[in-house]
Image: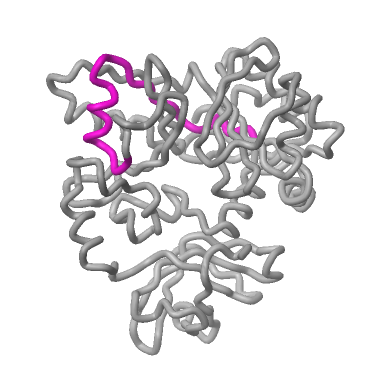
């Protein structure tokens, strides 16, 4: 089990810890409601240094990775990011990744616990290309800012105006003496920015952001509040809503797929599914009322099993428990009432995101 680099710092603020994918994360700082509210109304800072990083170097790095993922890499501009899936020849997911393309290398931002799996998958196909894989979790770490005051915090920390970054747009900066990358990450919250930091400089960067955030109502944000924001936004997480049998289109990952890039591992299956025009099941939202159902709970329509839950939270936006879950295409119409397991509790299909 891998502890957080800033464990001592978080411990001093009363944090409670959990493990995600075998790596330590802060669950909460004691007031999840205040953490969530800050991310919605002011600004919140999340220590995402539990995520894993893989670095790819070599002359053929872009063309090699281009043939391994569902997204464009060769023509991705230097200094920008993209979201992609890695799939098997049968189209099932190995993992998902955000790719940051820099002048001399590619960085892959991965869910905790998937780094070794992704590296093994890539190495299997790395034969004659001039590309080399490096485990880089010890070199880089991510901090995540969310909330409408994000630009103000970055302006204070970086010493100048910071225009909002669009999703996956990136720029470099110097923060607390550290060269960092700022990458727009608006999937969960429309002002979100990830700060990619040299791990050796993680503490001064965290402290500088906290200091700059004091005037903007900043709160540190734990994993539990981040999960609440994620589910409300309808964003699936690998390891929770996506597993190694998931086909990306089932999980609404059309935005992770380029249809103009040419061949990649698993392309034929993805192309056939796209041409067919539907998947047998899709990830959707579900309204549960006050029912406290667990992930994995079956969804039934009459006597027929039509799906299951994957993530469950109590949503402030909806004022009830909500879930992400997979539902058969014949039962995806919003408002469709499904039975939870053997009943009598029910769930209603709802469009995503819940915040719409």
Of 14 and 232, nearer the camera is: 232
Q: Is residue 144 above or below residue 321?
A: above
Q: Residue 320's x, y, as percent?
A: 67, 71
The answer to whether residue 137 is left or right of residue 314 is left
Examine the image and state in which quarter residue 69 appears: top left
In the image, residue 269 above or below residue 297: above
Q: Nearer the viewer, residue 74 or 5?
A: 74
* Quarter of the figure with the C terminus: bottom right
Residue at image location 65% in from the left, 64% down from the top: 314
Image position, residue 87 (x, y; %):
26, 45
334 versus 93 height, above or below:
below
Residue 76 position, x and y percent, is: 37, 32
Q: Residue at x 42, y 48 (%)?
A: 239
Q: Is residue 66 magenta?
A: yes
Query: Does the magenta portion include 60?
Result: yes
Q: Which residues are magenta?
A: 46-71
Looking at this view, name the residue that lies furthest to the left.
128
Q: How is the image coloured?
A: one colour
User: Residue 40: percent from the left, percent from the top?
Assistant: 73, 51
Q: Residue at x 84, y 31 (%)?
A: 214
Residue extending furthest toward the bottom: 302
Residue 103 occupies quadrant = top left
- In-front residue for pair 320/303: 320
Q: Please report the residue visible at 69 percent of the width from the left and 36 percent of the height from the top.
A: 45
């Amino acid at each position: 089990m891998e502890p957080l680099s800033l464990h001592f710092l978080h411990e001093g603020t009363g944090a409670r810890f959990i493990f995600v994918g075998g790596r330590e994360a802060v669950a909460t700082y004691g007031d999840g409601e205040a953490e969530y509210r800050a991310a919605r109304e002011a600004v919140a800072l999340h220590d995402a240094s539990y995520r894993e990083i893989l670095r790819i170097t070599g002359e053929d790095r872009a063309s090699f990775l281009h043939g391994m993922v569902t997204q464009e890499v060769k023509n991705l501009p230097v200094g920008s990011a993209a979201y992609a899936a890695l799939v098997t020849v049968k189209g099932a997911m190995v993992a998902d990744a955000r790719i940051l393309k820099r002048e001399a290398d590619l960085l892959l931002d991965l869910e905790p616990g998937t780094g070794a799996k992704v590296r093994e998958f890539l190495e299997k196909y790395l034969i004659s290309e001039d590309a080399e894989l490096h485990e880089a979790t010890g070199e880089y770490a991510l901090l995540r800012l969310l909330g409408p005051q994000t630009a103000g915090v970055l302006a204070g920390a970086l010493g100048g105006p910071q225009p909002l970054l669009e999703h996956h747009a990136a720029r470099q900066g110097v923060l607390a003496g550290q060269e960092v990358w700022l990458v727009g990450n608006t999937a969960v919250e429309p002002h979100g920015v990830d700060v990619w930091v040299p791990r050796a400089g993680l503490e001064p960067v965290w402290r500088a952001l906290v200091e700059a955030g004091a005037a903007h109502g900043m709160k540190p944000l734990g994993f539990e509040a981040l999960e609440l924001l994620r589910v409300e936004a309808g964003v699936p997480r690998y390891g929770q809503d996506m597993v190694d049998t998931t086909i990306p289109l089932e999980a609404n990952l059309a935005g992770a797929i380029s249809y103009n890039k040419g061949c990649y591992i698993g392309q034929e299956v993805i192309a056939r599914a796209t041409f067919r025009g539907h998947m047998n099941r899709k990830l959707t939202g579900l309204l549960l009322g006050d029912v406290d159902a667990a992930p994995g709970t079956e969804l039934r329509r009459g006597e027929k099993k039509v799906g299951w839950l994957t993530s469950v939270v109590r949503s402030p936006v909806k004022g009830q428990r909500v879930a992400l879950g997979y539902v058969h295409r014949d039962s995806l119409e919003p408002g469709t009432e499904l039975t939870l397991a053997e009943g009598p509790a029910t769930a209603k299909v709802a469009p995503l995101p819940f915040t719409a």
